[in-house]
């Protein structure tokens, strides 16, 4: 049966996983529509964007459970995510932003020192994740911070044209303004690939997939591309130096 995809919706960074997981505390396999992306009426003008990137909602050794995103309040059923997965997603996220002509992007690796300094401060013990995001953004005098969580990552069991189990992923992204903690935009991608016969309502994405059963990385890239297309950023113009 031919597959069908319905999309609903840096470099360094996986090393942030352990630190971020400490303060991003808990708040499917089934294919469900993602929540509608929410954004302000006008595109926020961004000169500097800190890409904190993704972290795992659940890490190796933890039991699957419902996890609440402490920044957006949305909940997802979550499974343990490997560090390598988070690292790959952060690399792809940052690369896509660079290709989108972002003028001043701060990668997760560069933000690591700020996160570490905040985490080791006794005064910041138990700081709320949103407050942490605000402090990281202010440290770089940034206009916004981009962060997200990974909830599910299941590769296909099979080949391009026949599977026992399809690829399945779930993750979200949030754009936060450091000055006041306002959520400028949020979006999520929650997808388990289905065959064309199981879902006939999105033929265009079926064509985009080339009629194949996608790997989990291919499916995740579809989601990243879609979310970044939806993200309402207007890059500020910079004056040319004479």
Image (cartoon, rainbow, N blue to C red):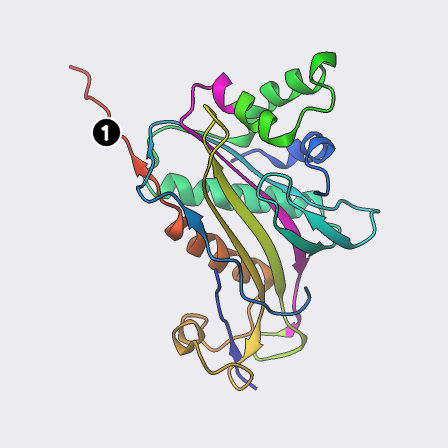
Relative to 84, say whether 188 is above or below: below
Q: Quadrant of residue 170?
A: bottom right
In the picture, the quarter occupied by the C terminus is: top left
Locate residue 45, reporting x and y percent.
31, 33
Note whether 192 is above or below 140 in the view shown.
below
The segment highlighted magenta reads 137-158
Residue displayed at 78% across by 54% down:
65
Q: Which residue is mark 1?
A: 237
In the image, residue 86 lies at what x, y percent? 63, 44
Q: Quadrant of residue 207?
A: bottom left
Task: Kindly identify the residue that appears in the image at 54 percent across and 66 percent down.
Answer: 33
Q: Which of these two is toward me, 82 or 57?
A: 57
* Residue 189 higher or lower than 197, as above or below: above
Residue 110 visible in image? no
> Where the N terminus falls, by quadrant?
bottom right
Mark 1, secondary structure of its residue: loop
Q: From the viewer's perspective, tell me whether residue 239 is left or right of residue 49.
A: left
**Which image quadrant for residue 42?**
top left
Residue 103 shows in the view: yes
Residue 46 percent across, percent down from the top left: 34, 31
From the viewer's side, name the closer residue of 194 and 233: 233
As drawn, is 21 to the left or to the right of 71? right
The one of 181 and 226 positioned closer to us in this rendering? 181
Q: Is residue 99 magenta?
A: no
Q: Is residue 77 left or right of residue 63?
A: left
Q: At 66% across and 28% down in the image, what residue appears? A: 128
Left or right: where 118 falls relative to 176: right
């Amino acid at each position: 049966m031919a597959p069908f995809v319905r999309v609903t919706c840096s470099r360094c960074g996986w090393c942030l996983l352990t630190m971020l997981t400490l303060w991003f505390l808990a708040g499917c396999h089934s294919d469900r529509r993602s929540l509608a992306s929410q954004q302000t009426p006008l595109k926020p003008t961004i000169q500097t964007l800190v890409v904190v990137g993704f972290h795992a909602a659940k890490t190796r050794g933890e039991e699957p459970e419902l996890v609440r995103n402490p920044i957006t309040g949305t909940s997802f059923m979550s499974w343990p995510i490997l560090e390598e997965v988070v690292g790959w997603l952060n690399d792809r996220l940052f690369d896509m932003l660079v290709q989108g002509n972002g003028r001043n992007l701060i990668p997760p690796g560069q933000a690591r020192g700020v996160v570490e300094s905040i985490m080791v401060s006794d005064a910041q013990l138990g700081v709320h994740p949103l407050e942490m995001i605000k402090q990281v953004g202010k440290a770089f005098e940034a206009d916004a911070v981009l962060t997200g969580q990974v909830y599910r990552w299941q590769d296909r069991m099979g080949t391009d044209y026949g599977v026992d189990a399809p690829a399945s992923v779930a993750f979200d992204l949030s754009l936060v303004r450091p000055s006041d903690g306002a959520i400028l935009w949020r979006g999520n991608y929650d997808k388990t690939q289905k065959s064309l016969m199981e879902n006939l309502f999105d033929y265009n994405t079926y064509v985009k997939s080339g009629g194949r059963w996608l790997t989990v990385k291919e499916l995740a890239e579809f989601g990243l591309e879609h979310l970044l297309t939806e993200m309402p950023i207007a890059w500020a113009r910079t004056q040319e130096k004479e």
